[in-house]
């Protein structure tokens, strides 16, 4: 009987997930320290979240999306979502953040059930639906569908890759206005 820490005792599918988490933790491009919550804690929490949900799958490729959003205290993780047959049918964005960085959570301190009921019931044509919400140990996680074509802002800026870094997606050299728009007629 062992303690369960040996790699030989872990099935290959779980071992590949463990390797993907370890690879995400060793990436130095994204490091946010928010009190006691670090990037490694956020990635591990997102991995445990996918293990608890039968339709979400942690894939072996790059999961952590670096710089996709503007909030430095939020970590975005892309995971696969499968249908009932087990085939991957799309992707889901897991937003992981500290409970203290969310205005909704820091002021009201709602229970997990009330919070999930509130966010899942929000419906609007311009907002992506919230699939699931979880809050434990001061970390808040929200699952939303990933739109491969990008957001409305991506369409406006003609950006073909929505998972690129925010600064590289939306910074472009401005173009001057045509002379006919700014010239005044001489009187």
Image (tube, rainbow, N blue to C red):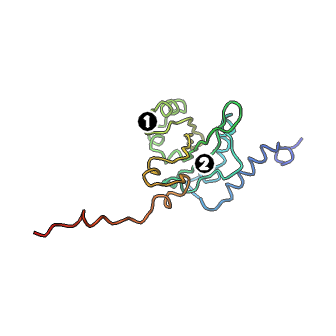
In this view, the residue in front, 8 or 147, is 147
Front residue of 44/23: it is 23
Q: Residue furthest bottom?
A: 186
- Outermost residue on the left side: it is 187
Percent from the top left, x then y, of residue 18? 75, 48
Which numbered marker is on residue 173?
A: none
| Pointer 2 local density, CA inside 10 Å: few below 14, some 14–19, many at least 20 | many
Mark 2: secondary structure: strand
Which residue: 65% across, 42% down? 80
What residue is shown with label 1? 125
Q: Horizontal and vertical percent for residue 62?
A: 66, 53
* Number of marks in picture: 2
Residue 4's place in the image compared with 179, above or below, is: above
Q: Secondary structure under badge 1?
A: loop
**Residue found at x 57% / y 35%:** 132
Q: Earlier in the sequence, mark 2 or mark 1?
A: 2
User: What percent of the width, then of the height, locates residue 98?
Assistant: 54, 47
* Disc number placed over residue 77 in the picture, else none: 2
Q: Quadrant of the C terminus?
A: bottom left
Distance, label 2 to label 1, CA atoms, is: 24 Å
**26 lies above or below 93:** below
Which quadrant holds residue 92? Answer: top right
- In this rendered view, identify the residue nearer to me: 102 or 93: 93
């Amino acid at each position: 009987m062992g303690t369960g820490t040996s790699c030989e005792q872990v099935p290959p599918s779980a071992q590949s997930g463990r390797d993907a988490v370890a690879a995400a933790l060793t990436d130095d491009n994204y490091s946010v320290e928010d009190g006691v919550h670090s990037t490694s804690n956020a990635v591990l929490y997102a991995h445990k979240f996918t293990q608890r949900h039968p339709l979400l799958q942690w894939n072996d490729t790059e999961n952590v999306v670096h710089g996709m959003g503007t909030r430095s205290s939020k970590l975005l993780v892309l995971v696969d979502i499968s249908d009932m047959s087990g085939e991957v049918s799309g992707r889901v964005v897991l937003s992981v953040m500290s409970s203290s960085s969310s205005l909704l959570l820091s002021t009201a301190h709602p229970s997990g059930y009330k919070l999930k009921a509130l966010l899942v019931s929000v419906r609007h044509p311009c907002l992506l639906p919230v699939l699931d919400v979880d809050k434990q140990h001061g970390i808040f996680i929200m699952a939303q569908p990933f739109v491969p074509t990008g957001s409305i802002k991506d369409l406006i800026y003609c950006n073909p890759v929505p998972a690129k870094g925010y600064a590289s997606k939306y910074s472009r050299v401005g173009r001057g206005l045509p002379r006919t728009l700014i010239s005044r007629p001489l009187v």
